[in-house]
Image: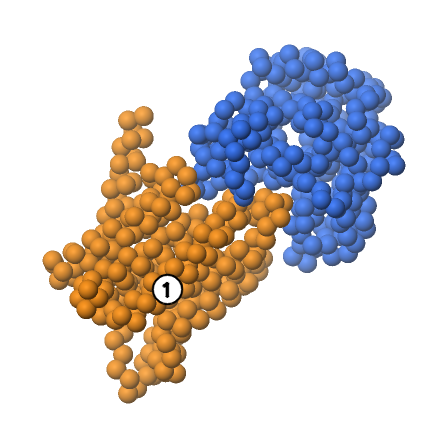
Chain colours: A blue, B orange
Amino acid sequence: MTAHRTAPLAHGDVARHPLGAHGAPGAPGDDAASRPLVAAQGLSVALAGRTVLRGIDFSVSPGEIVTVVGPNGSGKSTLLRALIGAVAPAKGRVVRRAGLRVGYVPQMLRIDATLPLTVSRFLSLPRRRSAAETAEALAAAGLPDLHARQMTELSGGQFQRVLLARALLDRPDLLLLDEPTQGLDQPGSAAFYRRIAAVREETGCAVVMVSHELHVVMSASDRVICLNGHVCCEGAPAHVASAPEYRALFGTGTGGALALYRHEHDHSHDHDHPQSRDPDHDPWDVAARRHPDDPASPTRGQD
Amino acid sequence: MLDDFLVRAALAGVGTALAAAPLGCFVVWRRMAFFGDATAHATLLGVALALALDISIFAGAAALALIVGLTVDRMAGPRLSGDTALGVLSHASLAAGLVAVSFLSGVPVDLSGYLFGDILAVSRTDLAVIWGGAAGVLALIAWRWSALLTATVAEDLAIASGLSPERDRTILTVTLAVAIAVAIKAVGVLLIAALLVIPAAAARAVARTPEGMAGLAIVIGCASALAGLQASLMFDTPAGPSMVCAAAAVFAVSRGAAALREARG
């Protein structure tokens, strides 16, 4: 969304959530005793004969935000699809809590140009929703009244928020978001993540978000899972960034690492030196604060 | 009233359009035009088999359309694109149908009637089958409408909502087979796909919602059937192709109007 609308929010958010040490609901530790909403146990998935996921043990507790990162083809989307039951496990199982309500935002949804679809009709798929319900969901997703607009006429950011609004209509216990900021520029991504964090604050739903962009996503996460066919490492954001497995996956130091590369890119114009970065310092905090109000931030299209 | 062959023809045309138009919307949205073509071509083999076995032509045609439809559903995969699978099946089954018809010695077969339709020769029984089939298709589509639409937007969204896109795709294939079988009498196996796709495509230019597009496609389909029939009487042209030409004319006008509107801003 636009910078002038999101910039004040950015500072507010950062102030409310001192990252890395915040007390948001569902922070690791205080929910260890509560039953998970969904759990993958020894989950292996094969697609077209190729093993995509091997021996995944993964669970989501009520109210926590989990970010799943990993390179392309690492099985992130497959993990989400296994959680909603769209792909069957080859081994292991997925256990969902009885009566679990799931809101799902798929990756890169494209509406065929031959399909006329207004926003309000899309929100009523598959069940009819009242105008009041859809208006509330649009507002919760941070959108103005777009009811009569065609889905194909929306901007990338609006489109993703309409998907979010649809996912929120069932008042989900668990929101599953598959690269929800793909195709958004960095201010747009940052704004979207803040909206997700706000939704969690308001509704208490748990969130599992898949991303290949480490720094923006993690600012709101309680826990990060690094996935590459199997779980490489898992922990709080700062922990993952310094774990050797993560470095090995994306490269070490500054040279060509995906997340680190983006980070460098963000800071190149003011001569910030990534090498001098303290590993205990939380770099995503900086990223989330900077992007929305920084007109010099490169957009994804230029990467 | 049904004694008049023209009334029967008009009712057959409208009944066929009623079944074909809303299904055609899904054919367009799901990019299944070639799928519709392949299953339609396959029905000629079904017709030949029905003639040889002396069973109902509708049943033979519907059975073959169903077999081909379900086969394509399962053939398409990582090894063979759906497009190629359809290309093989579409023309192989048409050729096999033509060969099979040539084996039917002793039975006088009006091949062009099956290829291009013979709506002026529709009997009361044909009418009952066409309207019965159309009613069945419309009922199934209306029942699964929302689920099919959700799966058309994204299968994973449908799954996350507790639906089964795979089952709904099979239902769509079944309704398509029935619609194609009842449409043979009106437009013949070569032009059935046109009756599916053209009214829906013409409606797209104007529609704002899926339901609006389906409703408009029905209106355009029925109007084209009647207009084509009228033209066929006036100019002594074949009825089935005339109906498709009428639908194509509506499509051209609708796209032209939409282009003009866009150009004006």
Image height of A173 relative to A97, above or below:
above
Looking at the figure, which quarter contains the N terminus of chain A?
top right
Q: Identify the secondary structure beneath mark 1.
A: helix
Left-right relation of A76 to B29: right
- Quadrant for residue A216, please give it: top right
Which residue is under mark 1? Answer: B132
In the image, what residue occupies the spot 19% across and 69% down? B3
Left-right relation of B188 to A185: left
Q: Position of residue B128 (x, y in %)?
A: 32, 67
**What's the residue type where badge 1 is placed?**
Gly
Subunit that carries the residue with mark 1:
B
In the image, what residue occupies the spot 54% across and 42% down? A127
Q: Position of residue B103 (x, y in %)?
A: 34, 83
Q: Position of residue A249 (x, y in %)?
A: 77, 37
Left-right relation of A249 to B121: right
| The residue positioned farthest toward the bottom in the image shown | B106
Q: Position of residue A277 (x, y in %)?
A: 80, 19
Looking at the figure, which quarter contains the C terminus of chain A?
top right
Image height of A69 relative to B147, above or below:
above
Marks counted in the figure total 1
- Quadrant for residue B114, please give it: bottom left
In this rendered view, identify the residue nearer to me: A138 or A230. A138
Left-right relation of A212 to A29: left
In the image, what residue occupies the spot 25% across and 69% down? B122
In this rendered view, identify the residue nearer to me: A227 or B67. B67
Res A256 seen here: no
In this rendered view, identify the residue nearer to me: B66 or B11. B11
Image height of B32 relative to B52, above or below:
above
Res B72 seen here: yes
In this rendered view, identify the residue nearer to me: B214 or B43. B214
